[in-house]
Amino acid sequence: MSRLLRTTAAAARAAPRLAMAGLRTHRQLPATARPAMAVRSFHAAAPARYNYDKDIYGFRTPRVFETPDFTDAERNNRNENANLVRLVNMYRLHGHRAANVDPLNLTNTDASTIFQLDPARYGIPDLDKTYPLAGIVHVGDANGGAKESATLDDVLSHLRESYCGRIGYEFTHIPNLSERKWFAQLVESYNYKRLQNDEKKRIFDLLTKSEVFDHFMAKKFPQVKRYGLEGAESMMIVLDTLFKEANGAGIRDVVLCMPHRGRLNLLTDLLQYDPTALFHKVKGNSEFPDDVPGTGDVLSHLAVSVDLEYGRNEPVHVALLHNPSHLEAANPVALGKARAKQMYMYEEGRDDDCFIGDRVMCVQMHGDAAFCGQGVVTETLGLANLPHFTAGGSVHVIVNNQIGYTTPAMNARSSVYSSDVAKMISCPVIHVNADHPEDVAHATAIAFEYRNKFRKDVIIDLIAYRRMGHNELDEPSFTQPSMYKNIRGRPTVPKLYEQQLASENVLTDSAAIEEMRAAYMDKLDKHLEASYAYQPKADTCGGKWSKMIVPTEAITNPETGIDVETLKEIGRKSTEVPEGTVVHPRVQKYHIDARLRKVEAGKAVDWASAEAMAFGSLLLEGSHVRISGQDVGRGTFSQRHAMLVDQDTERTIIPLNRLAASGERQGKLEIANSSLSEFAVLGFEYGVSWETPNRLCIWEAQFGDFFNGAQIIIDTFLNSGEAKWLRQSGLVMLLPHGYEGGGPEHSTCRIERFLQLCDQSFEVDAAAAKADVNMHVVNPSTPAQYFHVLRRQLHRPYRKPLIVAAPKGLLRHPMCVSSLADMAPGTTFRPVLPDPSVTDASAVEKVLFVSGKLYYELVKERAARDGLEGKVAIVRIEELCPLPIEELRAVVGEMSSAKEWVYVQEEPQNQGAYTFVEPRLKQLLPHNAELKYHGRAPSAAPATGISKRYKAEQERVVKGAF
């Protein structure tokens, strides 16, 4: 009892230190208050399996690794030594709590204070007793094998070394028995792997270069916020080890994302970024040539793509992605790009026999406060094992400074570790003391082995500190005086490792070490001198993107029509299923049979059929299509049915993936029903769109205004990525839009937000009009227009994000149909649709400009009023950005005698397209003509939720327009 009281007292004394320093203590209760302890069985859950269909997902079923179950002898041994089994399992479960993982020694706990690790608790106090080890614990011998038996004292020493050293492991929460057994054996045997002297010198070289670089920057640029790596230099060892292990395993590409801390060190010291170019940027210059109009970005967002040689296989290509200042927003982008890279290898026949993750690895870097604080982390973790989103396992590295800006852990999270949120996907977590680089390399190698074997995520929690505060101009002791008194009184990580290697006689010449530091400082000085004459080059994408251009003038919409017989064949095959497949009767009647009738007639083609023909035609041309979002397979409004489900077997069929004749190649349609996430999924799709220009990549919202959960991706990637980084994206956003009584959150896609982000000139003269706008925003009103705008995405010699205000009610509206002739050769997307009922433009007295589904309501109201046909023209603006200046100029010129010009919209006046269109359109009107507004009054909410009020408002909008 006294021992337990001492334990409780020790925990109470430690609690303030734990809270201040960044790791929370487990709550210690008096023995009488503790609940009965459930011993986690290593036989717990059956292994999870993935039901991957190669036709649906693109890859063969991933390997499911099974560690053989215990043999009869091992099982008997475990039964006879059950108390030892319990003790070993407690080290696996609780050993991380006693591990020396905090370099500041503020949170480290003595193993003797953790009662679960006391052998007396399990009735085995005799340290000299010898136990058989088979099936219980792996204790290595001098030859690299495993001992058959050992004394309890030897077992305990081994367990403490394995689980309570400078690495702490959390893995017993993994439900898969095979994974737990495999991981435990790896940890318990890995202690016997020792680094060679050349490996140690490599570590020392990287640590020293990082430190010299930071000292150089502090000396030459003392007022620059560079977010140096001081205190966490071992981050370099994590990444170098990952790249080396990946290269040895045959991985060709590593996609890496990271926040600001340590980015410049990594760029220059490991990823071969030209220091001359870096110093040119540090001095306030652009990273682009003078003739490139990009806005550029700040230092801490620079990126690089490089081949690294490790002498094992062909070089490993590492791509460090650009990132915005919104922490963790780049993580789903990296995950999407990593998956798309390997999908490209598979689809192009370069790696037809691969499993997901065989050739590409995603590495995601995090800060400790951001990892547990930013919701996109949880959303991205949720994608990790989903069949349409997995990249075959990501390695997550938390560079744990034990503080978020000035916020201590006790105020930053409600969990013990910042990594705890990752347990939602049952991945192992490895905590490691960043002051000990060899342990860091050891932990990283274990993390990679797990990821590469099971193709699942793994977390490395690199527990370090910030020597200089949040940035170099910050004074951290304002808020953390004790922590920074500790930090400033301790040797640096490179110095500690130098002392270790000197004691091991690995480094014997101190003068040579100083010469190395001086030589690197001199090299940086020369690069600084060269930066004064440096002329940057345009960093445009090569390879797959080499044929893409930057449009410097308006480019005519390409012809995107398709032979009518080909369209009919696509229409037929888009509903064709294998013989014996049982389709739902309503799908058969209203989707399959109805589409076949319309296709054969060649007219009255609806929205979903036009979409299927757009997809199918691109697939036959060899391009790929990926559409993701919640319920995209059938469509939120049950209109798409691009994937059909057998009602008896639940087998899924994607008919458009069977267009080509046997033996002929075609592109692949991937229908990715996603998790209930917007932020991470849109970021993922943006990453996919960054990888290959020949893939039509689409994200569809359930309702248009549901995109706002992903506003950060739109603001920092979609809208500005090309301007900041010269990286094009052809991502399409389908946002169901239209006032139909759905209430405030089911009516509008808030098109005004996208238009506000567009950079089209406010001037409409030819000299001022900007051809190279950052985004295209359309509100098409016919299926043919939708068909053409989708095909246009891949038929232009450049890529731009496309925002589609997509329909809801128009999906089945009897007037909203097209003929196959509207999609035949010679046809194209038309940014403006003049009124087809106007035969004499000079007779027009009033012109209504409108966009989207409101057109049909206005046409119906005009038809109900005698004498308005031919006098009131309804002009559809199908493309809102870039506003089609010349097309509108032509339409206005034909009807210049009109006396009244009105812009009509359903949205409130402070929303919708009016505020974007008005200042530009009014410049095109005849002299002294006024552009009037007609629509809802300004409003805080997008729409009313009261049905009677909605009907009255909509009637006023429609009738009042005349």
Image (spheres, rainbow, N blue to C red):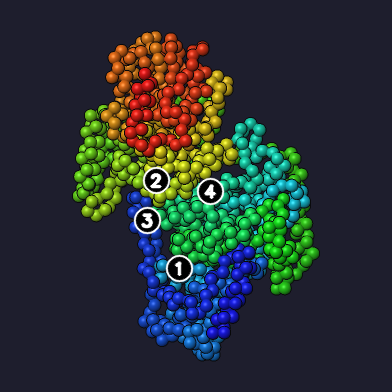
- Which badge, 1 or 2, is on the more N-terminal residue? 1
Toward which corner of the image does residue 769 lie, by quadrant? top right
Q: Residue at x 60, y 73 (%)?
A: 12
Q: Residue furthest right?
A: 511
Residue with the mark numbered 2: 629
- Which badge, 4 or 1, is on the more N-terminal residue? 1
- Which badge, 1 or 3, is on the more N-terminal residue? 3
Give the CA separation, mark 4 to mark 3: 30 Å
Place of residue 231 in the rendered image (x, y in percent of width and height, measured from the top left) = 67, 60
Give the CA separation, mark 4 to mark 1: 28 Å
Disc 4 secondary structure class: loop
Q: Residue at x 55, y 24 (%)?
A: 762
Label 1 neighbourhood size at 10 Å, few (<14), some (14-19), many (20+)?
Answer: some
Give the CA separation, mark 1 to mark 3: 28 Å
Place of residue 644 in the rendered image (x, y in percent of width and height, measured from the top left) = 28, 46
User: What is the three-letter code of the residue carrying label 4?
Assistant: Ala
Give the CA separation, mark 4 to mark 2: 18 Å
Q: Is residue 654 left or right of residue 721?
A: left
Residue with the mark numbered 4: 329
Place of residue 147 in the rendered image (x, y in percent of width and height, measured from the top left) = 50, 82
